[in-house]
Image (tube, rainbow, N blue to C red):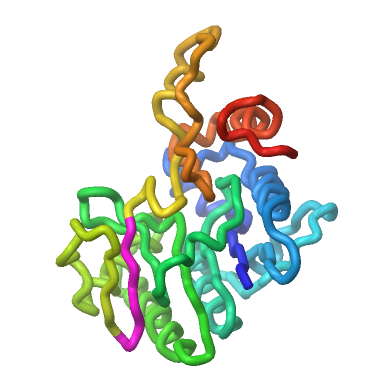
Amino acid sequence: MIILCPFYRDLNKHEKRITPGKIDTTFRYKRALHILEESFNRHHTGIDKFLICTDNTTQFNTQSTAKKHRIDCKGKNLMESLIHSNTSIVEQYDNAKLILCGSDHIILKNLSRLFKDSFDIAIMMRRNTGKVNNAVVLVNATPTNTNSLQEFFHLRQRIYYELKERTQDWGGDQESLRVALQQLGLLPEKASWKKTRLYNALGLTFKFFDYDSNGIYGVNKQRIKMLRDMPALPTRLPPLYSHDTLFLDFKGERKQYYERIYEEVCYKANPYYFKR
């Protein structure tokens, strides 16, 4: 069973003050969450689930059929809330393929191929930097690895509270993950050149993979530049994304074109077209 677990909660007044330039407050995250759900449901049926992870107060579109996994986030900042939500989800499920992510994504194909290798946790890395990219974390929960998975996520949660306050406010999700992997001796990575990068710690198998690989890709930067700089697009365009994309991510300024690209993906005849 695949469970896509996007995290979203409304910002409080304090967070709106401390995150200017870090969170695009013009981006409609709840609208993106609806699109993410719609695109996931198009490619998944049966026991697979779309599960919104949030706090106890955020309200959502009543048209959504998605279940909510709510936790008490009172007094917790955004990064802290996300980390506690991730831990809570791992504690909840002991027989599921969990995809922990945000809301600014679009699903293009069935996500089962994300779990084609044998691993317990898959961590995405920023290519050639040794830094963690926390856009997606894959967790293959089974009855035999549940305790070890929980131990890892509790370790990450404890590390978060040891970070500097500035990092806790923004970036603490990624930094706590990086430090946890470092404490387990998995970072710096010893064999990043390998095609399949599997490592063992805590009785778990960790898989590392780079952004723009393993079925998870960002929108083509060249295409975004055309959308931004040209009043009219040329007849021949570079593809929106790699043909291997299962899970399409929108980093940074690419969020500005999220709905426009969603419409293009849905309706235009191109090599990567999928029917609405």
**Magenta segment, which residues?**
202-209
Residue in front for this viewpoint, 108 or 124:
108
Horizontal side, residue 66 vs residue 55: left or right: right
**What is the x, y in percent for residue 224?**
46, 25
Q: Is residue 74 above or below residue 144?
A: above
Q: Is residue 204 above or below residue 119?
A: below
Residue in front for this viewpoint, 169 or 30:
30
| Image quadrant containing the N terminus | bottom right
**What is the x, y in percent for residue 256?**
54, 31
**What is the x, y in percent for residue 87?**
50, 77
- Dominant secondary structure (helix, strand or loop) of the stretch shown in magenta: strand
Query: What residue sits 48% from the left and 39% below the top?
Result: 243
Residue in front for this viewpoint, 174 or 213:
213
Query: What residue sits 37% from the left and 64% below the top?
Result: 123
Q: Is residue 236 above or below residue 107?
A: above
Q: Any magenta on residue 207?
A: yes
